[in-house]
């Protein structure tokens, strides 16, 4: 039997309907969308259909969508594009201490280029304090970049409140929505953002494709120079095959959002309830209410996450800590949330998906319970 897949926040399988939509563009329709003949015009229409499908999910104008190679490129383009376009007005950026490396590493790079970055703390639930955000704003602040939902613990940030505050000061707001698109509503007007990043492989589309929403009128410099593809924002012949896949994935996400949310949450809560009933000494991380419906970050006291994962060979999940030279390094997210070290070192992230079944959850409960019992027994024996 294959391991039980509970790592949907890391990546999702390609939906069969997405694969079917892509198939003709792998074999039959190969034209360059920039070509004026039949072959090119057919693929051009496919790209524009996909653009409309993404726009429908976000409830925006299709001309506000540009296709990228994934979430990391979208984040890079948003942050660097705003920084270079608005550096004459100011060089201060605000973000949080729990962002994905695709944001924090860009911020670190911009700091070497003369920009200043404020990294806001979060509370023990991983939630931003809006008062600390307002206190961090300066006359030279040009950009606020805060993820919509955290990839490790699932906490959902109050982006609509962030943008209302930023509007008072004329500040551009970007959100990394890689984890939230397809799991919770992400309409850009409700959020109020100027820029929003999507990663295809988090929404049952292929790896290697993404999108960046750029609100009309937002000035952003190019990241990729060349010909005038993607509304002059991103040079390079379009990745038609995967763009078609992303479009179909977004269409499916919009059609089935409520059903998928309910199913993922039911599976997550079944797992959480079972662990809380059967395994003593655990802590659930993330906001109890404002959390992705599929994400369960659990800390097991007196254990090390890498060893627990190794003991659970029949489950695919992620660790919130890593072993380095016999030491356990806790993730920056758990550190920022001040999760007690004894718990943080034993943190596992389980994330459910559309395909997760109740039978898989029940089998996973047996496996986790047995692994925790065996490891704790071994630790007790060592100290006896």
Image (cartoon, helix red, strand yellow):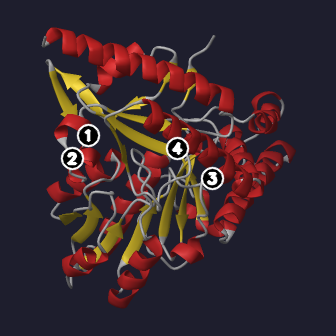
Q: Is residue 221 left or right of residue 353?
A: left
Residue 369 versus residue 15: which sits nearer the camera? 369
Q: Is residue 137 above or below residue 188?
A: below
10 Å crowding of disc 3: few (<14), some (14-19), many (20+): many
Q: Earlier in the sequence, mark 4 or mark 3?
A: 4
Residue 202 versus residue 247: which sits nearer the camera? 202
Question: Residue lying furthest bottom in this view?
Answer: 168
Q: Secondary structure at mark 4?
A: loop
At horizontal 79% and vertical 31% (from top left) the residue drawn is: 23
Q: Secondary structure at mark 1?
A: loop
In contact (CB < 8 Å): disc 1 and disc 2: yes
Question: Residue lying furthest right in this view?
Answer: 38
- For the residues carrying marks 4 and 3, which lies nearer the camera in this image? 3
In contact (CB < 8 Å): disc 1 and disc 3: no
- For the residues carrying marks 1 and 4, which lies nearer the camera in this image? 1
Q: Earlier in the sequence, mark 1 or mark 4?
A: 4
Q: Earlier in the sequence, mark 2 or mark 4?
A: 4
* CA gap, disc 1 and disc 2: 6 Å
- The disc label shown at residue 374, or none: none
Which residue was labeled with disc 3? 182
Counting from the top left corner in percent of width and height, residue 90 is at 23, 77
């Amino acid at each position: 039997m294959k391991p039980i897949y509970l790592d949907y926040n890391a990546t999702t399988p390609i939906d069969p309907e997405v694969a079917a939509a892509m198939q003709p563009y792998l074999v039959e329709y190969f034209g360059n969308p920039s070509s004026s003949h039949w072959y090119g015009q057919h693929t051009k229409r496919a790209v524009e259909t996909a653009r409309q499908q993404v726009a429908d999910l976000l409830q925006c104008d299709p001309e506000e969508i540009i296709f990228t190679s994934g979430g990391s490129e979208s984040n890079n383009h948003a942050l660097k594009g705003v920084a270079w376009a608005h550096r004459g007005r100011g060089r201060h950026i605000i973000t949080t201490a729990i962002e994905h490396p695709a944001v924090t590493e860009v911020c670190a790079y911009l700091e070497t280029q003369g920009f200043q970055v404020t990294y806001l703390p979060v509370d023990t639930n991983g939630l931003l304090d809006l008062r600390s955000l307002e206190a961090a704003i300066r006359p030279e602040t040009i950009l606020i970049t805060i993820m919509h939902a955290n990839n490790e613990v699932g906490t959902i940030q109050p982006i609509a409140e962030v943008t209302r505050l930023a509007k008072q000061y004329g500040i551009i707001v970007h959100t990394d929505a890689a984890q939230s698109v397809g799991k919770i509503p992400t309409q850009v007007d409700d959020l109020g953002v100027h820029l929003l990043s999507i990663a295809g492989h988090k929404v049952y589309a292929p790896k290697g494709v993404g999108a960046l929403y750029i609100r009309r009128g937002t000035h952003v410099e190019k990241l990729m120079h060349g010909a005038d593809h993607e509304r002059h924002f991103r040079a390079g012949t379009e990745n038609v095959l995967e763009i078609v896949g992303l479009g179909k994935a977004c269409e499916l996400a919009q059609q089935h959002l409520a059903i998928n949310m309910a199913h993922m949450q039911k599976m997550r809560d079944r797992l959480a309830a079972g662990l809380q009933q059967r395994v003593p000494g655990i802590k659930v991380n993330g906001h109890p209410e404002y959390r992705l419906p599929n994400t369960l970050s659990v800390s097991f006291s007196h254990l090390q996450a890498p060893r627990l994962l190794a003991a659970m060979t029949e489950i695919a999940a992620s660790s919130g800590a890593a072993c380095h030279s016999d030491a356990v390094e806790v993730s920056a997210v758990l550190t920022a949330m001040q999760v007690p070290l004894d718990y943080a070192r034993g943190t596992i992230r389980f994330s459910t998906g559309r395909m997760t079944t109740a039978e898989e959850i029940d089998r996973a409960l047996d496996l986790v319970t047995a692994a925790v019992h065996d490891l704790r027994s071994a630790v007790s024996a060592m100290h006896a």
